[in-house]
């Protein structure tokens, strides 16, 4: 039996992430990301849902999930954005991140989402699971410490923006407007 077989994946609506479980998610995020804010289980804004990798009550992996409308050129796409995908250092290299991504895609297909997008510095895991880098210019609403501070526009983000299209959707050319904050 592989070590990750004992880990179950649970989808949790964000309003239900409270108490000890929220504290465990916050601790996981701080263990995985330098500079993560103390005392909250999200960086800029809370996602709509989470996919949690649970070993007993321990949160060993997580993927934040946002439902978005995203404009690309003149086309508006129904999108999921994956945020803060991480696995606790002690639980890595056991396939959990891939399982979280697979569950995300299955759920997105059931929800008839056009595209799942994410921003990543290291592309290898996501590329193995069907995401590809795209080179569209992107604009988004800048948020810092619970304040809207402006509108950001970035030249093509071919080093970070990754998409996985679903169904018959083809990723279009054109400027991307995230119609909200950067995921």
Image (tube, helix red, strand yellow):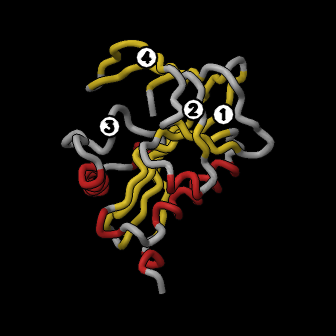
Mark 2 touches mark 4? (CB < 8 Å): no
Counting residues from the start of the chain, the first of labels 4 and 1 encountered is 1
> Which sits in the foreground, 114 or 119?
119
Q: Which residue was labeled with disc 4?
A: 152
Q: Which residue was labeled with disc 1?
A: 78
Mark 3 touches mark 1? (CB < 8 Å): no
Counting residues from the start of the chain, the first of labels 2 and 4 encountered is 2
> Which sits in the foreground, 19 or 79?
79
Q: Secondary structure at mark 4?
A: strand
Mark 1 touches mark 2? (CB < 8 Å): yes
How far, Cα to Cα, is label 3 from label 2?
17 Å
Q: Which residue was labeled with disc 2?
A: 68
How far, Cα to Cα, is label 2 from label 4?
18 Å
Q: Position of residue 175 (x, y in %)?
A: 61, 19
The quadrant of the picture occupied by the C terminus is top left
Q: Please tell me how crowded label 4 is: few (under 14), some (14-19), or many (20+) other residues with Cα within 10 Å.
A: few
Counting residues from the start of the chain, the first of labels 1 and 2 encountered is 2
How far, Cα to Cα, is label 4 from label 1?
22 Å
How far, Cα to Cα, is label 3 from label 1?
23 Å
Please name the residue shown 72% across and 23% down the image.
75
> Which sits in the foreground, 132 or 100?
132
Q: Which residue was labeled with disc 3?
A: 43
Whether residue 116 is visible to the viewer of this picture, yes or no, is no
Count of numbered tags:
4
Q: Please tell me how crowded label 2 is: few (under 14), some (14-19), or many (20+) other residues with Cα within 10 Å.
A: many
Which residue lies most toward the top here? 150
Q: Secondary structure at mark 1?
A: strand
């Amino acid at each position: 039996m592989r070590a990750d077989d004992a880990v179950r994946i649970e989808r949790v609506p964000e309003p239900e992430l409270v108490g000890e479980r929220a504290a465990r998610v916050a601790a996981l995020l701080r263990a995985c990301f330098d500079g993560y804010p103390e005392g909250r289980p999200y960086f800029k804004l809370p996602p709509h849902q989470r996919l949690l990798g649970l070993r007993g009550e321990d949160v060993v992996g997580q993927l934040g999930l946002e439902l978005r409308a995203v404009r690309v050129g003149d086309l508006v796409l129904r999108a999921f954005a994956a945020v803060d995908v991480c696995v606790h250092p002690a639980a890595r290299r056991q396939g959990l991140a891939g399982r979280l991504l697979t569950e995300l895609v299955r759920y997105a297909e059931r929800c008839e989402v056009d595209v799942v997008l994410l921003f990543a510095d290291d592309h290898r895991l996501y590329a193995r699971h069907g995401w590809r880098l795209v080179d569209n210019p992107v604009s988004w609403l800048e948020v810092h410490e619970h304040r809207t501070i402006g509108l950001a526009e970035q030249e093509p983000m071919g080093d970070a923006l990754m998409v996985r299209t679903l169904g018959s959707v083809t990723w279009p050319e054109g400027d991307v407007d995230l119609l909200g904050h950067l995921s």
